[in-house]
Every structure is written in structure tokens, then in C-alpha cells.
Amino acid sequence: MQRVLIFTALVSALFITGCKTTVQDNQAMTELRKKIKRFAPVEITVDISKLTGNDRKVLVKLCEASRLMDKLYMRQMWFCNETLLAQLEKDNTPEGKLRLAYYNINMGPWSDLDKSAPFVQGVPPLADTANYYPADMTKTEFNAWLATLPEVEKEKAIGYFYTIRRDAGGKLKTVPYSKEYKDLLEPAAKLLREAAELASDAGLKAYLARRAEAFLSNDYYASDIAWMDLDSLIDPTFGPYEVELDNIFNYKAAFESFVTLRNDAETKRLEMFSKHLQEIEDDLPIDPRYRNPKIGAMAPIRVVDVLHMGGQARSGVLTAAYNLPNDERVTREKGNKRVMLKNIQEAKFKNVLLPISRIAVDPAQVPHVSFESFFTHILAHELVHGLGPHDITVDGKKTTVRLVMKEISSAFEEAKADIGGLYVLQYMVDKGYLPKTLEDSMYITFLAGSFRTMRFGTNESHGRGMAMIFNYLMNEGSFSFDMSAGAFHVNPEKMKAGVKKLTGEIMTIQAEGSYEKAKVMLEKYAVQGPEMKRVLDKLADVPVDIAPTFPVAEQLK
Ligand code: ZN
């Protein structure tokens, strides 16, 4: 009943918006245009000429399932989201079309780049609980309830794949995703099963069939293992993974999907990195007892080109690389798999990073900004997620970094991967695994890239983590501001030490499991100083990210 009432209020609010005067409508349109302009429209294409007729049929099924992930994610965000979208789609006014376009970029009525401020009239602020928990639930209530639960139930309550609802008496309870999202997971499972039947690659068949089962059984373990073993030309990823939408605890996983083709040439070139993982871990700038003596020796790296992306992956700022699965049960046994979306990264570099570097970076250093450095650092970033402390002991109790760091775990982990990525690149240059020429360009490209990330705002974990890094490095003298150029400059001689110190500091705080220290560090450094603000203001007209369309997937329909 409550849902109906809220929605009725919402629809009337929308209707009222439509009845406003032309002048106000124009203002609204200017606002929307300004917001949309921050995303450069890009057609993401991929060569499918190598594929047989059956493989093409597999892709058709997968793209269809991928579109269902959009719906799932939107529902996880807000219970009114699907109805609101249907309403917005009916609005054929020029303003309505703009609003719908911006809604589609964000996959909801909250603007990812504006601290999730609503841009549709009548919509409430985005709840920290998203649609994973009852909207009126507080942290205190959840924690008090959690303390009463037996161990098995506790695991579900803080688990990735259970929503929290109220029973008839108003008491909190867990609901498995398989039940909560049955109406969407059943058709998705059917499509994955059909794709499995058509597929020729044995590993692909196994993954798709098991993932279909997981959607229905809520047990993702076997299909996560199958995904780790997957090495096929058609390389899909489907599932609930990232926890950022759960802004109250970072416990619950959002649905997303990637339908991709393996880029064989690049994958080979990058396999070299994974050979040195243990060596790098053994040399991390932390107390040796915090290093992992046995790290994902078989951790694979894939470079792929995207055909279609769905769900969280394409909501707001687009995912360019990922390190999955997140489930520690699987990563303990199998490590992580790193997937880099090369055609997405190229589009971002061309449309965002190059224009930023011309404004934010000392003109003398701009020529050193390169796609190779950008691409290699993203690889290193993904690799570092798998390094350093994960399973830790706090006060004699075994736990994980993710659990003790709660709502700041994402921001802190992203900062670790960004700065640790630089540390790893320097290590590889020093060892002669990477060419010395990279040294000139990697820090300058990182500086340019930091502005790309910081523009996401400090309410987003990558942006927050990067602001922390940036100010820390300014403090160390690794970066400085050139008043006359109005741009930032890399001081190569102070870079190495700054990067090493910060990498060590973040990883040590994670190893100690000190939520307090992490919070203090974020509060101290993840801020916007006057010089940073001056440069960010000058970037106003440069696109912040890209808005992809997937013409190849559309043609396959
Ligand atoms: Zn990351």
C-alpha cells in the first residue's frame, strides 16, 4: 500500500512538472543538457567476423540476458525505478526526452556525478540502504538484530546475496536473491541455459549452465569457480558482485553483466604480469608478517572487447576493468580473475583523458601522457586488488578487510589499488620487466588520470580514494602546483618515495584492520583544496565519462 501511495505522489509530481510554463521548462532543459554533455557519446564496437553462426546465436541470448541485468540493478536501487522508467518513456516532450536520456545514463533518477542528487521532480534522495534493506532501518537496529542471530543466519544477514526485509510483525528477516528477484532471475537463467546449449566451448557451456543454476538456487559458489576456469573466445560475466550501492554497510551485491570477446593479442602480452605476482607481494612495503606467502599463483588476466554491458557496470561512470569474484570463499581457493575492457578504455582515454591532460598538467609534461601508460596502470590497479591483506586477524578473531572497513572499504581498497598500481609499475621498471621509457610517462599519465577520477566526486569510492592519494602526494612534494601555468606538475625525484610510503601506509592499516585509522586518513586527505578546485573548475567543459551505445549488440537482436 505504501508503495502505491508514494508512487501516486510521484506521478502527480511529474505531471505538475509537465504543466509548468515554457520558461521553466527551458531552464530545466538547459540543466539537463549540461548534465548530459558530461558524457561523450561513443559507439562501442567489436569485430565479430570470426564467429560462427552458432556463436552468434549464443551472443544474441547473452545480450538479451544482459538487458535483464539492467532491470535487476534498477530494482536494487529503488523499488519505484521500473515504474518511473515506464512513466518517463511515455513523455514525448523535448524536456521529457532529455530527462529520459539522462535517466538511462544513470539507470535511475539520481545523478551519479552530483552526489546522487535526484534530477526528477518528486523523487526522494537515494537511500543509503538502497532497496536492499527496509527504508526505515537504521544501522543500530540492524546491528542489534544481528547480535541475536545464530552464526548461519548471521552469515546470510551480512552476506552478498540476501536482501533484508520485515516480516509481518515488523521484525527484520533475510530473503535470498533467488526469491526476491525471481521474476527476473528465472528468465535470465533460461537465456543462459539456452546459450549454454548452443555454445561449443566446454568451459563456456559449464559456466553458463552453472550460473543459470545459481540464479535459481542462490548458491553462486560453483558458478564462480566455473567463471574462474573460463577461457573462451566468448567471455561473459553475469552476476551480483559489487557492493557500492549498499551505502550503509557495503554488504549487498549489485547485478551486472559483461558480454565480451577475448582480445588474444593483448591477453598474451599481459600474461607476463601474472608471472611476477608472488615476487611483488614478497616485496610489498609492509611488515613481512602482513605479506601473503602464497598468492593466487594461477590468477589469470584477460583483455576483452565489450559487446554489451548491463546493470551496475554501465550505471553512471562506466566500468573499465574489474577484478572478480569478490567472494572470499572463492578467492581463497582460486584467486581472482582480472578482466580489462580494452575498447572501453580506449574510448575513455581519447574522449576524456587527453582533453584533461591539456588543462590539468604542466604543458611541458603533457607530451608524456600515453595510452600505453594509462592501459598498463589500469592492469596494475586490478592486479594490486589481489595483493596485500585480505584475510586478517583482529583482536584474535579471523575476519576480512572488507568486513572490518564496512562502508569505507571500497574507497580505501580503490586507493590501495591506485597507488599500489604505481608502486608495482615502478618495481617492474626497476627489474627490467617493463621498458625504462614507461617511467617518464607513467607518473604524468597518472597525474592526468587522477583528475579524471577526482571529477567523479568524493562521494564515489574511486573519486574519494583518488583525492586522498592526490593530497597525500602533494604533501610529500611528489606533485606540485605551478602558479604561472595554473596546472600541476610531477616532481619525478620525489615520486618514488611518496608512492612507496603511501602504499605501505594504506596496506598496513588494512592489515591491522583499523577502521578508525582508515577513516581518519580519508577525512584528512580526501578533500578538495583551492588549487585542485581551480583546475577542476577549468575542466567544466571536458566530458567526465562516456555514454556508450552498443551497435553490434543491437544488430544481433
Ligand atoms: Zn578497483
Image (cartoon, rainbow, N blue to C red):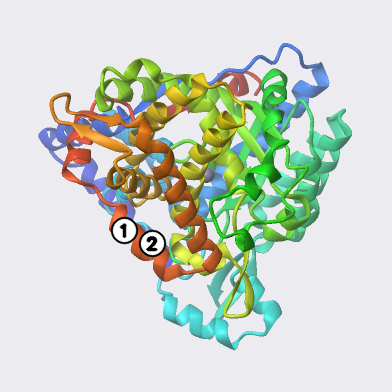
Tag on residue 388?
A: none
Q: CA distance from mark 2 to mark 1?
A: 8 Å
Q: Is the C-beta separation of discs 2 and 1 under 8 Å?
A: yes
The N terminus lies in which quarter of the figure? Answer: bottom left
Determine the residue positioned at 67% across, 63% down. Answer: 179
Compared with residue 460, is residue 55 higher up or lower down, i.e. above or below? Answer: above
Q: Is residue 238 above or below residue 484?
A: below
Residue under the image location 69 percent in, 38 percent down: 276
Q: Which residue is mark 2?
A: 127
Reading the image, the residue beneath label 1 is 124
Is residue 179 or residue 159 the one in the foreground?
Answer: 159
- Of all residues, the one furthest to the bottom in this rendering is 148
Q: Nearer the viewer, residue 357 or 424?
A: 424
Confirm whether residue 161 shows in the render.
Answer: no
Q: Image quarter for residue 61? A: top right
Q: Secondary structure at mark 2?
A: loop
Q: Residue at x 43, y 50 (%)?
A: 501
Which residue shows up at 22% across the image and 48% down it?
A: 16
- Determine whether 374 is above or below 118 in the image: above
The answer to whether residue 468 is left or right of residue 511 is left
Disc 1 residue crowd, few under 14, some 14–19, many 20+, Cα 10 Å: some
Amino acid under label 2?
Answer: Ala
Residue 264: percent from left, percent from top? 72, 21
Give coordinates of residue 112: x percent, y percent. Answer: 36, 44
Mark 2 or mark 1, which is nearer to you?
Answer: 2
Q: Quadrant of residue 197?
A: top right
Classify mark 2: residues with Cα within 10 Å, few (<14), some (14-19) or many (20+): some
* Label 1 residue SS: loop
Give the residue type at disc 1: Pro
Camera-nearest residue between 352 and 75:
352
